[in-house]
């Protein structure tokens, strides 16, 4: 159970939800993790839990919309640990809105917290990942693949992430760097809140998932992330891995 022994990982949005689930899975496999998150209170709590397994793991409080600071964060992690092996671009914020009612601010929020940080972190981490033949894990969503209504800004940014990930897989492959995507359905705090507010829609959604449940943050999503971050996935790149209980079957 030490598939990531000695590895250094950056996880954005690592203070809660899927990001925290992945961070916990990583440290239990031996990785030292730097979680990047805007929520200082949640970050401080999560890092205490992570340090029970990996005392050297760190929390960096940051606003990912401040794009000019992302390269400095990457350098900070590299200088502390001496290298970077794994980059996980998980953070993303958005607002639900129809295309008819969508505002420039809605689009800006989604792209500035999702697509642009993903791009800039990949760019900044590339020199370090070349040295380690590292791994990049980005995140997409069924909202983009299916074109879910009222999810236009989120879907657009997520599909942009899928596009740049495929380009990165082709460009970074000669350096021995793997670049893949996870598209999850997970039992995140946001999903739980939505389910409580919309119980009928929630039950309808669950009934359409072949496995009839949401994915667990650490044991389902986190374990797939461990696989993609480990040597076990060395011959997989440019792929969207649907970790959604069978909801979407890509062709």
Image: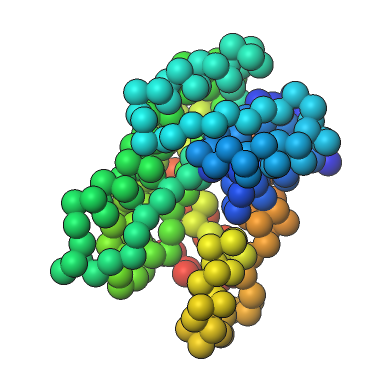
Q: Nearer the viewer, residue 75 or 221?
A: 75
Residue at left 50%, top 21%?
74
Quarter in which the C terminus is drawn = bottom left
Q: Position of residue 157 (x, y in %)?
A: 32, 50
Q: Residue furthest left?
A: 100
The location of residue 73, given as percent across then percent down, is 49, 22
Q: Is residue 111 visible?
A: yes
Dividing the image into 4 quarters, which one contains the N terminus?
top right
Q: Which quadrant of the figure has residue 115?
A: top left
- The image position of residue 81, as x and y in percent, is 66, 16
Query: Measuring 43% from the left and 48% from the top, which residue is drawn there?
Result: 92
Q: Is residue 16 left or right of residue 237?
A: right
Q: Relative to the observer, which residue lies in front, 226 or 200?
A: 200
Is 115 displayed left or right of 24 in the figure? left
User: Does 127 sit left or right of 134 as displayed?
Assistant: left
Q: Residue furthest front?
A: 41
Q: Position of residue 135 (x, y in %)?
A: 56, 33
Count of marks, rendered view:
0
Against 47, residue 6 (above or below) is above
Q: Above or below — where is 107 with respect to 242? A: above
The structure residue drawn at horizontal position 82% and vertical position 35%, both measured from the top left corner, is 53
| Residue 175 appearing in the image | no
Q: Quadrant of residue 8?
A: top right
Q: What residue sits 67% from the left and 50% below the top? A: 21
Relative to 13, 67 lies left or right: left
Task: Indicate the colouring scheme.
Answer: rainbow
Is residue 126 placed above or below 99 in the rendered structure? above
């Amino acid at each position: 159970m030490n598939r990531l022994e000695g590895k250094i990982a950056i996880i954005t949005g690592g203070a809660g939800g899927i990001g925290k689930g992945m961070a916990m899975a990583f440290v239990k496999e031996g990785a030292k993790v730097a979680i990047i998150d805007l929520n200082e209170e949640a970050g401080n709590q999560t890092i205490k839990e992570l340090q029970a397994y990996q005392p050297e793991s760190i929390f960096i409080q940051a606003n990912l919309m401040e794009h000019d600071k992302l390269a400095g964060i990457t350098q900070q992690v590299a200088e502390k640990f001496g290298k970077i092996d794994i980059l996980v671009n998980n953070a993303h914020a958005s607002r639900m809105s129809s295309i008819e009612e969508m505002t420039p601010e809605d689009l800006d929020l989604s792209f500035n917290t999702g697509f642009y940080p993903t791009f800039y972190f990949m760019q900044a981490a590339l020199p370090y990942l070349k040295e380690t033949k590292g791994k990049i894990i980005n995140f997409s969503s069924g909202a983009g693949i299916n074109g879910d209504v009222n999810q236009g800004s989120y879907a657009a940014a997520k599909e942009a992430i899928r596009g740049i990930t495929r380009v990165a897989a082709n460009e970074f492959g000669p350096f021995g760097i793997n670049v893949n995507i996870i598209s999850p359905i997970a039992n995140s705090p946001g999903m739980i809140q939505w389910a409580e507010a919309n119980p009928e829609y929630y039950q309808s959604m669950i009934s359409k998932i072949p496995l009839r449940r949401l994915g667990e943050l650490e044991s389902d999503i986190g374990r797939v992330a461990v696989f993609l971050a480990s040597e076990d996935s060395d011959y997989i790149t440019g792929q969207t891995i649907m970790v959604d209980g069978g909801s979407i079957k890509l062709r």
